[in-house]
Image (cartoon, rainbow, N blue to C red):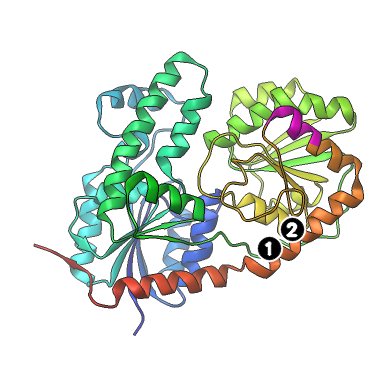
Amino acid sequence: MAMKILLTLPRPLFPPDTGGKIRSLNILARLARRAEIHAVSFADPILDAVAISEMRSTFESYTPVFWREATKRSVRFYQEVLTNQCSALPYFLAKCYRPRFRSTVEELAARKHFDLMFCDFLHTAAPLLESTIRPRMVFEHNVEFLLRKRKWEVEKHPLRKVVLGAEWRKTRTIEAKVCRSFDRIITVSGQDQQTLGHEFGIKNVSTLPTGVDTDFFRPLDDRPQPGRLVFVGSMDWDPNEDGILWLLREAYPRIRQAVPDASLSVVGRNPSLHLRALAAREPGVEITGWVPDVRPHLSRAAVVVVPLRVGGGTRIKIPEAMAMGKAVVSTPVGAEGLPFCDGREIRIAEQPEEFAQAVIELLRNVSLRNSIGTLALKEVASRYSWDVVVDKLEEILEQMTRPRTLAVVA
């Protein structure tokens, strides 16, 4: 008999236009062929209309909890952030604490008698912390407090520094409670597993590596454009914008000075006006916004750059670029949790001068660039199948559900 899973998600998984949604969709859509999954998520009744239909086609059932989230950097967004300063919860979780979400999940659990509850992201686990549904697990795509702490560490603006300091401390408190009360925590890297174990004194942590669809992401026939640098990522995720701003200010001018025909393409949805303004002042920089398919952009890259200073989890953009045979230059934070060797399948550099020099060397040295891209492709093709990832997840779920079944305890 197929396992029955109650799945909670922050948003519908369509379109898969962020690293988290790409990872979740690839894992959970495959798991849905092996198990009976009933999904619940927040959704915008208008903007997510197509996504709701796709969710219902993917899973056994899908229940949207309708909610219109404040647009980032809107007046309402800033009002909510300001009001939330008096809350014990960080803003990104406080906005998910909606009674209708918990009641919808618990009514479904009482009606269906599932084998377990699977919470995707801390965003859906935290609002269900006091729920009596058991067993339950949370998939931590990032160590959320650490992601925010790193952002606080690099912030220069005094007011934002104060707000971010409060956010990461609040996040650590609630993240510790969730990790200690849930039956199983899943991380995306051994490094995140160690961090959670060390910070919260827990042992119920398993690692689920990042995969890549090597049938979709594969080398194309396009020739790389000389000097072309490409970054792929959702530009409304703060760590991505921070990384590109750092690249444009600190490393890109050095690269252009050494390689005059160097150019940069930033590919990802919702770039801010601030980023567009800065990019407009730099020669050869293209900000594409949302694109239907990132592969043509990656294919034209001579080098793929991942200049992140803030982040957590693992960057799915790196194995995807590698699956297309591309040489990648990343910061240590960008490549964190990925088992690739500097100088072999990837180049890793932290300081602006080192990062620029690594890029310059690869732009000038075609044979070195091809060697790194080829080794990276072989590594990803042999070890990063999504089906292998789902096999491991199934093992974890079976261990969790062996002795008992899910119930809403009176």
**Picture coordinates of residue 314, whole percent (x, y):** 55, 50
Q: Does residue 23 appear in the picture of this structure?
A: yes
* Residue of label 2: 376
**Picture coordinates of residue 323, whole percent (x, y):** 72, 60
* Closest to the observer, 55 or 251: 251
Which of the 4 image quarters holds residue 6?
bottom left
* Closest to the observer, 308 or 297: 308
106 to the left or right of 386? left
User: Residue, x 46% and y 47% (percent of image)?
Assistant: 142
162 to the left or right of 253? left
Q: Which residues are magenta?
A: 351-357
Which of the 4 image quarters holds residue 12?
bottom left
Say above or below: 241 vs 383.
above
Which of the 4 image quarters holds residue 35?
bottom left
Q: Is residue 200 inside the magenta stretch?
A: no
Q: Is residue 356 inside the magenta stretch?
A: yes
User: Residue, x 40% and y 70% (percent of image)?
Assistant: 396
Q: What is the three-letter code of the residue carrying label 1?
A: Val
* Residue of label 1: 380
**Picture coordinates of residue 134, whole percent (x, y):** 22, 64
User: Residue, x 74% and y 34% (percent of image)?
Assistant: 355
